[in-house]
Image (tube, rainbow, N blue to C red):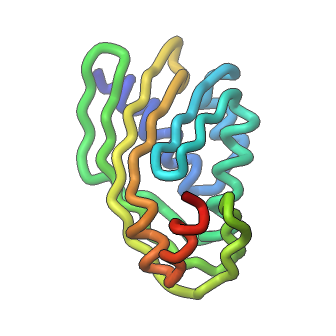
Amino acid sequence: MANVIDVAKAAVTAYNEKDWSKARDILAANAVYDEKGTNRRIKGAGEIIEAWQGWAKAFPDSKATFVREFASGDTAVLELVWKGTHTGPLQTPAGTIPPSNKRIEVPACQIVQVEGGKAKSAVHYFDLLTMLTQIGASGAVKTAA
């Protein structure tokens, strides 16, 4: 069980450190990342890292704190809190949201399936409306919907 949790946490830690090489080593080449908050389903390690880099551009200091974790078989569940400052442009389907210099604190949950010591799939639940409200851009949801 610890190995499954370790792999799941390592992917988040790689993002926290903005270590894209480490992220590539942790993700399976054909990994799938299902980002429920944005309704994006991304396939392939390279494409997933590209999406993460987009978040890192908008929130360069963003980091997840682990609240708790659970594992069953090949699957880990991570409860997280994302914190950061919106100091870069945030790309959305409705256009770019300019930096607000406001802080975010967003609870989240990731369900990560591990296969062969790598993260094969991840489903990431977080409240996009809370984040957009915190940066003063909740009107973007109406436009994107």
Locate residue 72: give its quadrant. top left
Q: Is residue 57 left or right of residue 132?
A: right
Q: How many numbered markers are drawn?
A: 0
Kindly identify the residue that appears in the image at 26 percent across and 39 percent down. Answer: 69
The relative height of residue 81 versus residue 2 in the rendered view (above or below) is: below
Q: Is residue 120 above or below residue 39?
A: above
Residue appearing at x 36%, y 16% in the figure: 74
Estimate the x, y position of residue 114 in percent, counting from the top left.
Answer: 46, 20
> Quarter of the image containing the N terminus?
top left
Residue 3 in the image: state x and y as whole percent. Answer: 38, 23
Image coordinates of residue 66 in percent, x first then y, are: 33, 52
Tell which of 138 and 69 is nearer to you.
Answer: 138
Rendered residue at 57%/71% (across/down): 140
Residue visible at 50% across and 80% down in the picture: 135
Q: x%, y% of residue 75?
A: 35, 22
Q: In the displayed structure, does residue 39 sit left or right of residue 57?
A: left
Position of the C terminus by quadrant: bottom right
